[in-house]
Amino acid sequence: MDVNKEDDSPYYDGWANIYDKESKAKGYQGPNVAARALGRMLSGNRKEKVILDFGGGTGLVGEELKKEGFEKMDILDSSDKMLEFARQRRVYQNVITAEVKGHNSTPLAGDSYDAVLGVAVFCTVGPSFACFDIKEMIRLTKPGGILLVILRTETLYSHLFRDKLLPLFEHLQSEGTWKQLERSQFKYMYGVEGQLFVYQIL
Ligand SMILES: C[S@@+](CC[C@H](N)C(=O)[O-])C[C@H]1O[C@@H](n2cnc3c(N)ncnc32)[C@H](O)[C@@H]1O
């Protein structure tokens, strides 16, 4: 798949100062829905589960995971400024600055995490975060682990992703890379629908 790559971090650095306030004002539910879903899907002792918040930004997801009783969370993002806010929350064990540029692009070992969450990382505002980066999320997830994706419904059906993301998700299922555990629609923010996908890596 040919997708132009460019560094979006200046864009996200500029957004960081107002990100939490804006998310609250807009009634953003992605982090909350992600954490609840993971709580339903991950069996066993939550305190022992190692989770990666992939493209975690200011750490809103980590905050919600903590409320669900998870304790071992790492966050990865390309924006230093976003991660500055995430660090201040003191919910993450490791704060990793890395730009995802496809398969094998992050400095993390494969099969490291019980769950990898990508919440609002497939965005039309930052064109470089392309759908093949799902392969990097898969690489980092342990066999039997959970991979969770949340995005806006309008993003899923936008020109950038319309013919790419769903066919890729289906292909990954038919080739036996993962098994879909859940797909549902929810109120992403005021007046905006969102999609939740939960997969188990096989
Ligand atoms: C819309 S924010 C979502 C943040 C968080 N997951 C949430 O739900 O609040 C998207 C995040 O993805 C990060 N991002 C975008 N492209 C990236 C890339 N190529 N590599 C790593 N992080 C990236 C941005 O820096 C930003 O923090």
Image (tube, rainbow, N blue to C red):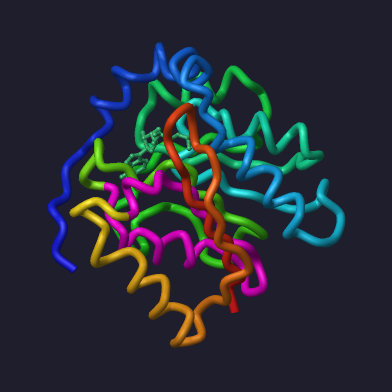
Residue, x 39% and y 21% (percent of image)? 81
User: Looking at the image, in which quadrant does ligand 1 appear?
Assistant: top left
Q: Left or right of 64: which side holds 101?
A: left
Residue 116: percent from left, percent from top: 56, 54
Q: Give the range drawn in magenta.
A: 129-156
Q: Does the magenta stretch include residue 143?
A: yes
Quadrant in the picture for residue 44: bottom right
**Going by the image, does 50 lie left or right of 105?**
right
The answer to which quarter of the image holds residue 15 is: top left
Q: Where is residue 184 in the image (x, y as percent from the top left)?
A: 56, 56
Q: Out of 130 and 71, give the one closest to the viewer.
A: 130
Residue at 82% over, 46% down: 47
Judge whether 171 appears above or below 191 on screen: below
Q: x and y percent of residue 67 in the render?
A: 77, 32
Q: Going by the picture, which residue comes out furthest to the front?
A: 191
Q: Classify 177 as above or below 49.
A: below
| Residue displayed at 39% across by 19% down | 16
Quadrant location of the C terminus? bottom right
Q: In the rendered image of this protein, does residue 130 appear above or below residue 119? A: below
Side of 149 where 34 appears, left or right: right
Quarter of the image with the N terminus is: bottom left
